[in-house]
Amino acid sequence: MKRFFVVSVMVLIAAGIAFAGNYEISKKSGDLTVLASIDKNPPVVGDNNISITVKDSSGRAVTDAKVKLEYSMPAMPGMPPMNYKANASLIGNAYQAKMNLSMAGPWSIAIKTTRRGKTSTVKFSVDAH
């Protein structure tokens, strides 16, 4: 019975890790902090929704900015580079956009926030499965 319990707990932990919620990353750019949350972890080939929260230096949500999402995959043998852009729309206190990752592999993501004539960029990478 004890062995069954230990094995059951291990299976539940593994399942929790495999289906862990969103992919999230937080980065600072100038006086802004950007939190990006992708609805799939890991991101997948096809549509992935991304929610972007921007906060100022005092921790207040920034809702007066223009947020653009750029995502790309470098050229590989026999394949040109892929570059895509999407404008994020403000819904509540977060900016929402959709990324369509066209193939599995490493993707570079840049979130560009323009506010009061100043643009700041946050960059990170994900692996689509």
Image: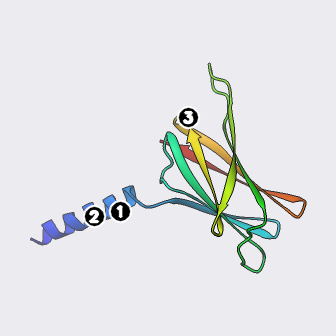
- Residue 42, horizontal then vertical, whole percent: 48, 50
Are dots 1 and 2 in contact, CB under 8 Å? yes
1 or 3: tag closer to the N-terminus: 1
Are dots 2 and 3 in contact, CB under 8 Å? no
Secondary structure of residue under mark 1: helix
Residue type, numbered disc 1: Gly
Q: Which residue is mark 1?
A: 16
Q: Which residue is mark 3?
A: 102
Residue type, numbered disc 2: Leu
Label 1 crowd (10 A; few <14 / some 14-19 / many >=20): few
Secondary structure of residue under mark 3: loop
Q: Quadrant of residue 58?
A: bottom right
Residue sitting at x 61%, y 61%: 25
Q: Which quadrant: the N terminus?
A: bottom left
Residue type, numbered disc 3: Ser
Cα distance between the residues tagged 1 and 3:
27 Å
Q: Which residue is mark 2?
A: 12
Label 3 crowd (10 A; few <14 / some 14-19 / many >=20): few
